[in-house]
Image: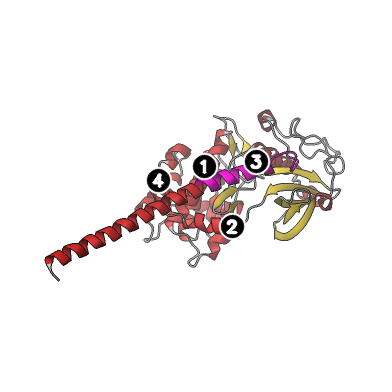
Amino acid sequence: MTNQDKIGFVLSIDKDWQNILEKCQSIDNNIKNMQTRLTFTIGQMNKEIGNRHIIPVFQVEEEAIKEETRLPSQGESPIKKPVNLAKQAQILAPVYSTISERFQICKFLGKGKFSDVYQAQDKQTKVIVALKVIPKATLQKYGMEKQLANEIKLQGYMDHPNILKLYGYFQEWSKVVLILEYATDGELFKLLKKQPKKKFTEQIASGYIRQIIEGIGYMHSKNIIHRDIKPENILITHSLLKIADMGLSTYNPANQVRQSFCGTVDYMSPEIAAGRDYDHTVDIWAIGILAYELCTGETPFYEKKKEDTMNKIIYSNFEFPNYLSEECKIFVKTLVQKEPKKRPSIYQIMQHQWIQRYEKESTIFNRDLLNSMVKLLK
């Protein structure tokens, strides 16, 4: 091969490589455009679903969530004789209907300790929703009337892409039914367990944690603490995470503290486990625990006995697997600090290198987005 041939060959390769780069750039731009269009479309769909003329939606005003939920007086049953538990929200007010009148049940989605969940379709509009059906006998047995009223009140007040939307609720004579946004891909917990090694890559985990931070940040901006962040309470719709289950959430104005002992032990902060006062930073701790779990497949303080787990949370530290990146380790350590005042703010978490790095990389090629688009187009 002559020098001229070699030069021509190199130029040919350079030209081919340039064409490849241009095509990659074009694909990247198309993906970004699709992402923008998809986000807009989902937003429009949510607006339509939230339209009172399509599905009756109640709107909880800010003043209502500040009120302490009133329980009925002794001897007065909120089940047989529903009462107005919040002036503007009219929680558990006697709006009687039947599921069969309004919805066609499509399939059974799952069973919790206190409720059954079904996929259903509104007969008039054909909108797909999830129905959470709670027997009134269960509410009475476990004394959950106040908790349910609180869940309806807070979830009805919030409106954010990363928080599962509560469209409304109604009663049958023996049941309370919540009309919820339908999450197409189910629980984050089940998706985690389906992974080959029961864990996500750091890139995927970081993207999920970023969405959770955004949702929890919104809640904190409204002075609401979730208090039960865990993968079972996070749902997925086409790679978009939805924080769900506000049963233990509470309104907590700035500079106030709480004392209630609640939450799931594995994600519980030291101050709750020890029975001390706490504030919104318990959610920051839980996000750190969740980040560790998504990257490793297990929680850092787990022990077979709950008492041992709680003692470990209060008094012990934990180790990281060698395969985790230093950025990931630092991220978790920053959030999972036993002293609440040392935990970072939501803004500081969003600026962390572990979040920022993978957020930038995800804009180059978002496989999850393409898979979601394929699902939508089928």
Q: Answer yes or no: do the residues labelled 2 and 4 have beta carbons within 8 Å? A: no
Q: Which residue is mark 3?
A: 47
Mark 2 Cα within 10 Å, few/some/many (few <14, many 20+)? few
The spot of residue 186 in percent (x, y) is 62, 57
Residue 73's image quarter?
top right
Amino acid at dot 1 = Glu
Mark 1 Cα within 10 Å, few/some/many (few <14, many 20+)? some
Q: CA distance from mark 3 to mark 1?
A: 20 Å
Is residue 112 covered in magenta?
A: no
Query: What residue is rendered at 68% in x and 31% in y?
Result: 61
The spot of residue 51 in percent (x, y) is 70, 39
Query: What residue is rendered at 59% in x and 40% in y?
Result: 160
Q: Which residue is mark 2?
A: 377
Q: CA distance from mark 2 to mark 3?
A: 20 Å
Answer with mark 2 or mark 4, whichever residue precedes in sequence.
4
Give the SS element for disc 2: helix
Give the SS element for disc 4: helix
Q: Nearer the viewer, mark 2 or mark 4?
A: 2
The spot of residue 260 in percent (x, y) is 63, 41
Task: Give the vertical position of 147 relative to 231 (above or below).
Answer: above
Q: Which residue is mark 1?
A: 214
The spot of residue 144 in percent (x, y) is 74, 46
Q: Nearer the viewer, mark 3 or mark 1?
A: 3
Q: Answer yes or no: do the residues labelled 4 and 3 have beta carbons within 8 Å? A: no
Amino acid at dot 3 = Lys
Answer with mark 1 or mark 4, whichever residue precedes in sequence.
1
Q: CA distance from mark 2 to mark 1?
A: 28 Å
Q: Which residues are magenta?
A: 36-57
Mark 3 Cα within 10 Å, few/some/many (few <14, many 20+)? few
